[in-house]
Image: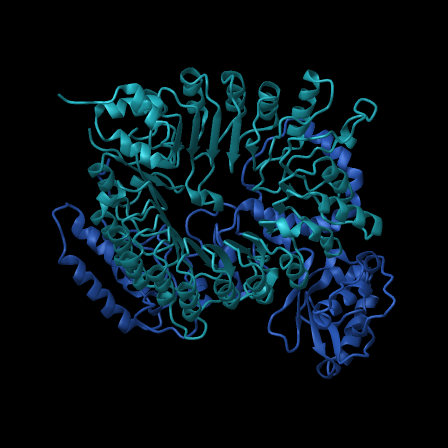
Chain colours: A blue, B cyan
Amino acid sequence: MDSGLSSLGGGSGGGGCGGGSSTNESVTTVSKVEVVEQMSTEASSYPGEAELELGLGLSLGTGGGGGGGLVKPKQPSSAWGEYGRILTAKDFPSVLSNASSTAPRFSNSSAGPVSGTKRAADSAVSQEVGSATAASQVVGWPPIRAYRMNSLVNQAKALAAEDDKADSENDKFKDTLKKKPYTGSNKNNSTVKEKGHLGFVKVNMDGLPIGRKVDLDAHACYGTLAQTLEDMFFRHNTTMPPIRSDVEKGQSTNPSKLLDGSSEFVLTYEDKEGDWMLVGDVPWGMFLSTVKRLRIMRTSEANGLAPRFQERSERQRSKPI
Amino acid sequence: MAYSFPEEVLEHVFSFIHTDKDRNAISLVCKSWYEVERWSRRRIFIGNCYAVSPGIVIRRFPELRSVALKGKPHFADFNLVPDGWGGNVYPWIAAMAMAYPMLEELRLKRMVVTDESLELISRSFKNFKVLVLSSCEGFSTDGLAAIAANCSGRFSEESRISSFDLLSFATFFLSNQTKRYNRFELKPACEVDIGSPISLIPDFAHHWCPSTFPAWPPRCPSLRTLRLNRAVPLDRLPNLLRRAPQLVELGTGAYSAEHRPEVFSSLAGAFSNCKELKSLSGFWDVVPDYLPAVYPACSGITSLNLSYATIQSPDLIKLVTQCQNLQRLWVLDYIEDSGLDALAASCKDLQELRVFPSEPYDMEGNVALTEQGLVSVSEGCPKLHSVLYFCRQMTNAALVSIAKNRPNMTRFRLCIIEPRTRDYQTLEPLDVGFGAIVEHCKELHRLSLSGLLTDRVFEYIGTHAKKLEMLSVAFAGDGDLGLHHVLSGCKSLRKLEIRDCPFGDKALLANAAKLETMRSLWMSSCSVSFGACKLLGQKMPRLNVEVMDERGRPDSRPESCSVEKLYIYRSVAGPRSDMPRFVWTMKTPS
């Protein structure tokens, strides 16, 4: 079964062919040579082992990449020298200090996150950019069981669908009387990530390092949204949360300070075009379709943007709904 | 003259020996003890269904009553094992149907259980009492209907079926009951465990006409455990609780409703009536206003699963601090450091803590949960020994504190969500921190690593973690030396699972013999070459070396090419015959 295999040479390397640009070639080359020399002194009688050792040299070198499984399908056969370049400073994390800590190394090393098969289509493109995509592109990471992920997602949707529940309960039962297969871990994860974030947007407040998330689907108007945010950020320590039903019916008696400009903060949002807008100018539905995230901004900072807000909101109002 | 006990005496003595380890030890003493032991063994646990064949088990143990089987590797929980890999229980059922007509209990985990299997179970075992399916798949309500129809009335309290939708099962089960009994009685207590979000719903009012069943809901005097489907609204709960005040474990349905004082007081009254309640879970779609209704029952609660409750820290704190006798808490990271501080101050009996991420794919973090929360709990809860903690930052200093605070730690699973995260204060790897864990916690038997880790941490583990049985590693290490430390140093290691680490052939080949002392080794996205796999398969006849590669035949690529996934396990049954097209076993030349 093993006869006739092409010789190792520069073929698909034994180790993870970590991508990433080389920044420190001289150090890289030296290290690789050292590694290879160590290996060759331990060659044994196994026929292909000398070549195997070289392969091992590669795999030992690509420390950070870790993407051992993935092999770029069209490796040039005479690419030995190229492998030298592939070993980069990033591949020797313990040797070379890498001040920029977490994500960059990982996300730049293209072999790592894409290792093996994309089982549950985490290839659903992340809405968050930059280093934030690192873990979300990796299959099976973070290690959370599929049904737990789905439950969290479904809860977000369920909150929105609560009104329909009573009607559909009977229907649901009829459906389940029919043969219903259960497929274990839900392989429909492809949309898990996106659906999960449909209703929730991030909210950051100036001066607070940790942001929160709010479910926009749970609100039907600006009033309740602002009320919820005020409770979240300004009344975090109260003992009695407001009575939900009133809030959801939009009957909050105190108009939100965030909306009427009387507090030192204003509520703003970033829309799909990347502009920061004052919340409340456009119809709720339109707001929902363009909002990417929210920010509770100091009034002093927002003032400077006001003219632009008005300009944009005028443009928006003139668009057909 | 050699004196020996008559077999009957031996058998009687052996009947007091229950654990597998002890029974295995007894069977090694001498041939006659081996014989007596094997005829008297009644229960068996098979941690890897491919390590042995049904025939071998039946030949050795002809009188089993209780069988437990596990199938897929643990990483299957995280979608790392492709569909169709295997673990089908049918061959076992078929063999046991002939050999063990008196079988009473079957416990399956991570196996494929088809309707045919369930139907066969329901027909074959007249004394069948306990069925536990954890994280299984492949069946439908038809199979469950067969179980309900043929086994109902005989299920014991312990019977558990998890991980699937039991809405219809309840229907079949209960409606079949009524064919036998004129009165509607939920009997026996069919527990429905729920590790999963979907559960039994005795939602009778919807589905049965009140005139046929006037006594609704039925009295359930033997019901100990009831976990409701998320669809069961909160205002149903008081009535159900009143009918089953002896409940020990309750999983609520949706825990939300419009705020109505009469519903609240009814609920609070019902809870105060449940004097035996020890475990609470569910809390789907929870509305904080209704949480205080649970307070009357809190003093008896030892297990609280709030891991689906999307409520904020202040409400969580209020609930948790009511439960002074809490031993186990599962919660979302909404609890934040402040909540964990409160937990540490109030719940001195806490033994197990699991903190799950509310936003696992959000790199920036949405809650104020840091390493400090875990440190607080480790300081304040002297009995804490089992931890699963998802967070976004960690320091070596925190891990060292935790280790020193809790030398009694037995299970420590830390998941820092971003791979290869450094100690955020010193920017160093977390080697020293985990090193402290294994050094101080001498009874540690399960460990999961995360963060930036070099070979040093594996050196610590190999040196100190002598009781470690299961180790999970991801995105760690520099090279083969790391793997070598673990394989050569961890004397008690049984299960090792590794993903995305630069471990190659050398350590694996050098420690091949070690692999026969372990249950299994999983390596995915590492640097093990196909050539090494073949070599291992050739040299080690008692290991099954399975290469999983969805790119096609591994021998269509150079031998030095790394395999995608590798699963090695010891087996006396030889290579399995049910491999899918993407799994190849490295055969020993015959």
Q: Residue B452: x percent and y percent?
A: 39, 64
A203 in relation to B98, above or below: below
Q: Nearer the viewer, residue B12 or B240?
A: B12
**Quarter containing the C terminus of chain B:** top left
Q: Nearer the viewer, residue B31 or A181?
A: B31
Q: Residue B75: x percent and y percent?
A: 44, 45
Which of the 4 quarters of the picture holds residue A208? bottom right
Q: Nearer the viewer, residue B342 or B257?
A: B342
Q: Nearer the viewer, residue B210 or A148?
A: B210
A122 in relation to A133, above or below: above
Counting labels gives: 0
Which of the 4 quarters of the picture holds residue B194? top right
Specify whether residue A102 is in view.
Answer: yes
B464 in relation to B26, above or below: below
In-image side of A273 versus B572 (left or right): right
Q: Residue A173: x percent and y percent?
A: 72, 32
**Quarter containing the N terminus of chain B:** top left
Specify whether residue A124 is in view.
Answer: no
A266 in relation to B307, above or below: below
In-image side of A148 versus A56 (left or right): right
At x 42%, y 52%, the residue is A115
Q: Residue B137: x percent and y percent?
A: 52, 34
At x 68%, y 52%, the residue is A156
At x 81%, y 66%, the residue is A282
In-image side of B105 versus B192 (left or right): left
